[in-house]
Amino acid sequence: MKSYHIKSFATPLLAFFILHSSFFVFSSCTEQESSMVEFEEDNNLDTPNDTVYSLLGIIQKLQQVADRTQLFGELRGDLVTLTDHASLELQALANFTAGTSSPYNKIADYYAVIQNCNYFLSHADMQLMKRGVKVFEKEYAVIKAYRAWTYMQLALNYGSVPFFTEPLLTENDANPAAFPKYDIRQMADFFIQDLAPLVDTEFPSYGNMSGYPSRRFYIPVRVLLGDFCLWSGRYREAAQYYHDYFTKTGNIHPTTTRSIGWEDQKFERVLDAYRNSFATPSDDEILTIIPLEEEEFNGTVTHLDDVFESTDDNKYYFQATPSPAYKELSRSQRFVVVYADLVTLKADTVSPPEDMVYSSEDFRGDLRLFSCWKTASLTSNSSNISSVYQQFDKLGFDYVILYRLSHVYLRYAEALNRAGFPEAAFFVLKYGLCNDHMDKYMSPAERSAAGDLITFSGYTFTTSNTQGIHSRGSGKANADKSYVIPELASKNDSILWVEDKLVEEMALETAGEGLRFYDLMRIALRRGDPSFLAKKVASRGGTANFDSDLYQTLCNPQKWYLPY
């Protein structure tokens, strides 16, 4: 199969896209870094060779926002805290004081992606045929998804932003006052309609690019539609889009049964298959990445390792580490082992005793923290090198993950819950949705009411490839008799209880991946309660270190967004 490397396409057409993607549509005349370069109006895309080059040019612009996508979503949440060695710029992000001069606050880079997408979508000859197939159709779907995702990032990080869908070809065009400002709900309304016709459009295959399958560079349209529906409160539609993504014929996505857990009821040895979820984008757990270079000499690289890990560049002084709040949550989980009683030969369950002494407290409770975050003491002869070494196994060496399968399952559960099906939503956490599990444990009323939203083929979704997400780190959640929805006064109370459990599971499963602040934001907006987000973030120092000043700041939703 033919293999490509992103940096190898030094062609005039790609050079055209790279040059013109430095265009910042809303630049200030005082910004030294911005430049105004006009697109050539007659440079139409009308040959088959234009497709790959155009797409790669846009991917190169996505590289510019890759790291900050993760930093914006994680440092402003409650699951990591900064160390004394964190840069002032990272501290400003975490404290919600970053200004327009912050090196991370470059709205221009997002609009550069959008400008290039708009140019392609306006200039690609969609009637061009080759062997009876529209030449640009597959790239058209990919680039529409890129544009929608980039606008989503703008809305989540900046609030309401200028919105346009045509390329701006002159300085006169680039007048922000000429465009409406869209927030996340307005963008959702636009892009749900824009993307819906593309759900069954196949994406292009270029073999391997930068060492990874090219299909990993694309954002699944159904997943993106589910996200927009989730943000806009269209919960049943969101659940349907996610469900249909999992169950598409010929391309199914069961949860898998990958996990980390104690080997047996003696609690002496841990078996870890969970960390393999992050080993390579070739794995089906990783759905979408932004590919980057291995060396700066070749182009854009990730610097997330210098933030979350000990490296030679930072002299092992990592800048972000699991927060006390995250550790408290992880250690509060009940781990359950199922074993056969030697006397009765019946299956029984057991959990580690409360007074059990561990070699590391990271073994207590849920084990995903232990799986992905490693620290070790070092002996150093130099005071310039840290005596503590940290490794974070969720990071890619030359890519940033945008979507994992578990992300989508958790959002699916969130949508099911708010669509009025808390039992089905909790099933995603406790059992995993497949017919064998539902036949045994789900009430007929819930199964009938949810209908197509939880219909899975008994041949392709089975107990051998489907489990509850909570079982990834807390043992056999399906056998934990205490892990159940309690009897509550109303269905709405059940929905709120399940949603709180989903917020916990999002923390346990996705900590450090750049999703947390947006998850908290979405729940707070849905509940009409800014204090929900404010309390979580202000508590990241642990129950004994509540930051009342930060809490007061974040009770004002306007403080959630970056200035521009």
Image: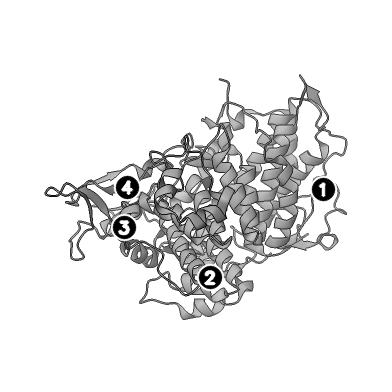
How crowded pointer 4 is (Cα within 10 Å; few <14, some 14-19, many 20+) is rated as many
The kind of secondary structure element at disc 1 is loop
The kind of secondary structure element at disc 4 is strand
For marks 1 and 4, give the CA distance: 48 Å
For marks 4 and 3, give the CA distance: 16 Å
Residue 65 visible in the picture: no
Mark 2 and mark 1 lie on one chain; the one further toward the N terminus is 1
Give above or below for 107 relative to 211. Answer: below
- Identify the residue under disc 1: 166
Mark 1 and mark 3 lie on one chain; the one further toward the N terminus is 1
- Identify the residue under disc 2: 492
Q: Please tell me which residue lies in front, 132 or 538.
A: 132
- Identify the residue under disc 3: 480
Question: Which residue shows up at 20% across the image and 56% down it?
Answer: 359
The answer to the question of whether label 2 and label 1 lie on touching residues, with beta carbons closer than 8 A, is: no
Q: Please tell me which residue lies in front, 491 or 168.
A: 491
